[in-house]
Image (cartoon, rainbow, N blue to C red):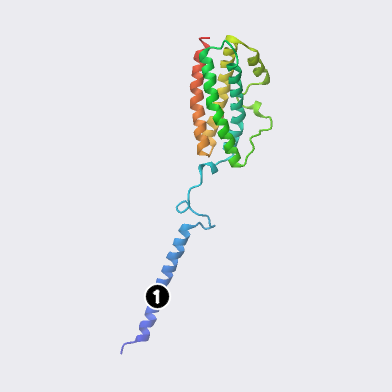
Amino acid sequence: MYDFKRKEIMINPRKYVLAAVALTAAVTLSACSTGGSGETTSSTAPSASAEAQFNDADVTFAQMMIPHHEQAVEMSDMILAKDGIDDQVANLATQIKDAQGPEITQLNEWLDAWGEDSDMGGMDHGMGGMMSDEDMKALEDASGAEAATLFLEQMIMHHEGAIEMAETEVNDGANPDAIDMAETIVSTQSDEISVMENLLGTI
């Protein structure tokens, strides 16, 4: 005689195993959509905006580069306001203004988005390549070829300081847009240094 009870006993454990496997699979699928702490993984969530990715190096880069660029623009304005300046020098000053003005705006926008202050508390003159008050006064008072030569000499040092800061950002920063700007600064200002060094021999 066929033992139905024995069959039931043998089947039930198999049902339990199948149910357990199904439950495990469901839990596993659920775990794939969220991390153990409830954090959404990159496979299911939209990637964070590039603007939201930043670290201390990005903040320092922006805070230091703003006054650095502002002084370069001021120096360019000084030379452009003078008479008797070599056209090539005037064109370079205009080029510097056109490049660094929009970068100042962008750097301020990043700091606002990051919730950081752009004010460095008057420490800007300690940055590489920054001109002292005496340096700026000397440029303001100079005229003609003397002013053009002084502008080139000062701006070469100024650019060298900016390149050093930008290289630090490229190496240590986390924000992709800030790193892109830093790479542009290194490339552009390196080229401008070469132009200025050549101009020094012709004025």
Residue 25 pos. (x, y %): 42, 65
Residue 147 pos. (x, y %): 60, 12
Q: Tally the marks.
A: 1
Between 40 and 111, which is closer to the camera in this rendering?
Answer: 111
At horizontal 36% and vertical 84% (from top left) the residue drawn is: 6
Q: Amino acid at mark 1?
A: Lys
91 lies above or below 106: above
Residue 198 pos. (x, y %): 49, 14
Disc 1 crowd rating (10 Å Cα; few below 14, some 14-19, many 20+) is few
At horizontal 55% and vertical 34% (from top left) the residue drawn is: 106
From the image, which quarter does the N terminus lie in? bottom left
At horizontal 49% and vertical 34% (from top left) the residue drawn is: 180
Q: Is residue 202 left or right of residue 11?
A: right
**In the rendered image, which quarter is residue 21 located in?**
bottom left
Q: Residue furthest bottom?
A: 1
User: Judging from the image, what secondary structure is the residue with disc 1 in?
Assistant: helix
| Residue under pointer 1 | 15
193 lies above or below 110: above
At horizontal 57% and vertical 25% (from top left) the residue drawn is: 161
Between 63 and 127, which is closer to the camera in this rendering?
Answer: 63
24 lies above or below 42: below
Residue 152 pos. (x, y %): 56, 16
